[in-house]
Amino acid sequence: MSKENDKSDSQNLPASTVEFIKQVLKKMRYRRKVRRDVHAELAAHFEDELKDCKTDEEKEQKAQQLITDFGDLKLLAILLRRAKKRCRPLWRTIVARTFQAVGVLILCFIVYVAWFLSGKPAISTNYVAELNNMVRPVADESLNAAPLYIKAIELYEKRCDDIAELRSKTQPTPEEMGPIENDMLRLLGKKYEEVTSEQKKRIEKWLNDNNEIFELVIAGAKKPYHWQTYGGRGDTMEMMSIVMPKLSGFRRLAFALRSRAQLRAEQGRYEDAFADMKSCYRLGQHIRGDKTLVEQLVGISIEALAVQTIRDIVGGHEIDSTVLADFQRDFEQIINDENFAISFKAEKLCMYDEIQRCFTSDRFGKGHLYLPRFRKISDLAGGYGNEEGVGDLIVAVLYSAPYLFGHPNKEETLKSVNALYDYFEQLSLKTAVQRHAESDAIDDKFKELVNGNFFLRTLTPAVRRVIEIGNRPPTEVGAALTIIAILRYNGDTGRYPQNLNQLVTAGYLKQLPIDSFADKPLSYRKTDDDFILYSVGPNFTDDGGQYSRDSKGRIKNWLDNGDAVFWPVPKPQPK
Amino acid sequence: MKFESQLLKGIAPVVVLEILSRGQMYGYELSQAIEQRSGDILTLGKGTLYPLLYNLEAKKLVKGKWENNQSSRKRRYYSITGRGKDQLAKQKAQLKELTAGLNLVFGGALATA
């Protein structure tokens, strides 16, 4: 029935009737076709009732009477609607109910999302302050090496004109940085055997002119403690943004000390060279401890630099046994009771800080992931990056949705972090061999602990790699002491020992050096006029003292091929 | 006579079915037939008529269809279905039994002279 029919239906009817029918249909609020049918029926009924009326007044009067008989307009509309709804076929009922159900679910979802997103994190603990408390021993400031080191670094940077010039530029281009020969910073960073004679003269002059720097480092190395105060960037005290206190400066000092030691060794001043390396090693020791992982790794690298340089010096020069004995004694004292295990305490504080920032407070949303912070973490993990425009934002929300709604809450994540870091501490106490044997179990355990937790998966450091790096220092230190002991033995007896036990028996070594990657003493083999001393390395396979090499064929210890050979010290290789 | 609405409530459907069982009718025609055949005793309110018809249609006791009659206007004629006839028979039996019971209660006072 069309609109034209509607008009024709109402043609012969009084205006009040037409209006009445119109109001009934309006209040009925149903499908147009059904309303048209009802319209036609009602119009027909009124027409039939009024057909005997002769005048318009009579029609109008009777119409009014009929309208009254029909009763309450609203009630009539409701009854008609209800009855017509019952007439609809089953499939239409199912479709209508399904849409209603979906609509209700969507509405509930929207309400849930609004409630969910209304939560905000509550930052209640200053973990930077806690970290500062943790790293500071109960000691007077006069026993702290940090002020001396900082002064040395600042002096170094000031005295190094190239650095000052570079620092005055925001983004110096390679052309602006000048040719490498004029860059003292880079010269000091190069391996000593790679610099030319001319460059060595320049280095020597600079080192002599800046002796004050080294005096400060040496004085700092004599202090029993080292701690610095961590600070946040700007106004924030976020653990993720704490400013690493001058780490690059420490590395520069270590390189400078190395250069000076090698120069001194070349001049035959072996005691002075060893003194520099003891200070360098001590510098590395100071940076380690219960500090952030990156600091510990820098400390390890400085210690490794010192030990490598010691090997280079003893490998490149004939040094008197007495000098070697004195150095060995001093060095044993330095490493006495050194805790080589990696500490995860600072990282744990970082996780706690991130939990309080990444999860809403318990009041609203029951401690779920907080979207703005979650996005920042996702960016760290190479997530969806910076969004622009509505389309990208929708994609970002869809990307985040599974994590927001399905992710473990604050309490669960906190439990997982505690369990995870307890496990890391246990792992760090195992030897490399033990970890290697339990590799699959460790992988499974790790997966179990981080399963379904995007927060943990993103922020947890590469722990196994870090722990493996932490296994190197005791092996390297043991190797360095063993080499010195062997050279002393050779100096005193004119021959190399048959085995390492002879060194212990003869009093040249206090104990056999342990290979962390084999859970047994380092591998030693006497050759015709020399000896080989090596660790089986991270591939846990004894390759018979074969050097491990990188992809360019350069000898480099601690790779996944070959052994970590400590002696013979490889000769300088062509580039 | 105005009857209690609750009294008429149960009666209206069976009355409509009975009248439609004698032939199809449209709404106005049906309301007139109810009055006439009940001797003006029973009247179906206009506001009740069409909702009742639609409800009966939903229950498949009657079916409606548009037809042309003598006038130019189409009208919707309602006719009883087979299911409607069964329901009518059932309700008539119940009413008969009810009447008999009431008669006994009222000592035959409900029987017409």
Image (spheres, rainbow, N blue to C red):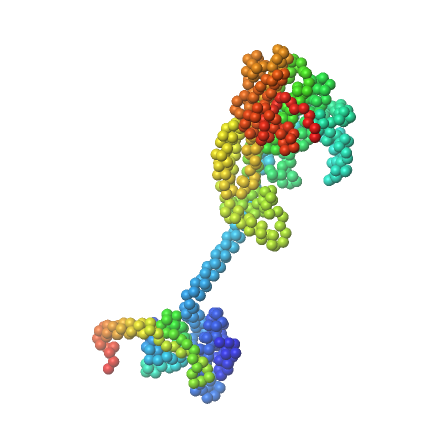
For the C terminus of chain A, give its image quadrant.
top right
Q: Could you tell me if residue A115 is visible in this image?
A: yes
Q: Residue at x 43, y 82 (%)?
A: B68
Residue A521 shown left or right of residue B50 in the figure: right
Q: Quadrant of residue A547?
A: top right
- Residue A455, how many percent across, how many down? 54, 42
Above or below: residue B1 compared with residue A269: below
Q: Residue at x 60, y 36 (%)?
A: A128
Q: Quadrant of residue A226?
A: top right
Above or below: residue A375 compared with residue A46: above
Residue A227 shown left or right of residue B86 in the figure: right
- Residue A98, how many percent across, how many down? 45, 61
Residue lying furthest top in this view?
A493
Depth order, front residue of A14/A389: A389
Q: Residue at x 50, y 57 (%)?
A: A107
Q: Residue at x 71, y 25 (%)?
A: A193
Q: Quadrant of residue A490?
A: top right
- Residue A134, how many percent across, how many down? 57, 31
Residue B62 shown left or right of residue B94 in the figure: right
Above or below: residue A139 compared with residue A76: above
